[in-house]
Image: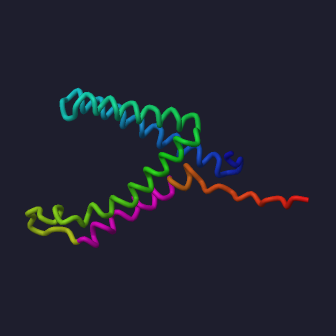
Amino acid sequence: MISKGWTHGLRRMATLFVAFGFLFSMERACYDAYRGMTSIAVAVALSVAFLALAIGLFRMNWYARRITAGMCLLAATLLPLACVIPFHMTNLELAPASTSGLELWMVPFLVICLGLAWLIDPPRRKVPLKPKR
């Protein structure tokens, strides 16, 4: 159960923000299929998944929040690695950016992803066990 403190409003606002992001992603998948950039089957699968997650987040469903928090953690884990893959460094530019400079631009994104994961799916409180008499 969600606590009813000041964090409840913040948690609800962050969850609605992500739910509207999923609705936008659903629309984008349909638009890409319309333009022929992806197949219809992929667009339908993505649209159904994004719509289900958005509806679950609007209803504050525990499973939808847990899946969304996992997606935020996965993005925070994998995106910094995308800057240092060897294929990215083969671009023929006059002055390629340094890896540390690229990683520095990832810090705000990582903070936002980790903060959203914590807000959307907070850690559960441990209930102390009552001793049996």
Furthest-right residue in view? Answer: 133
Residue 76 horizontal side relative to residue 31, left or right: right
Which residue is at a point 79% across and 59% down the rendered structure image?
129
- Does residue 29 lie above or below 130 as drawn? above
| Quarter occupied by residue 47 | top left
Q: Quadrant of the C terminus?
A: bottom right
Which residue is at a point 48% across and 35% down the rendered structure image?
54
Furthest-front residue in view? Answer: 133
User: Which stretch is magenta?
Assistant: 99-116
Based on the picture, tell me whether residue 100 belongs to the magenta stretch: yes
Which residue is at a point 18% across and 66% down the rendered structure image?
86
- Percent coordinates x, y for residue 120 in the rendering: 55, 49
Q: Nearer the viewer, residue 131 or 104?
A: 131
Q: Quadrant of the N terminus?
A: top right
- Percent coordinates x, y for residue 17 in the rendering: 49, 42
- Does residue 88 lie above or below 28 as drawn? below
- Percent coordinates x, y for residue 90 in the rendering: 12, 64
Which residue is at a point 59% across and 48% down the rendered structure image?
11
Identify the main secondary structure in magenta: helix
- Percent coordinates x, y for residue 128 in the rendering: 77, 60
Residue 25 horizontal side relative to residue 66, left or right: left
Coloring basis for residues: rainbow
Based on the picture, tell me whether residue 101 belongs to the magenta stretch: yes
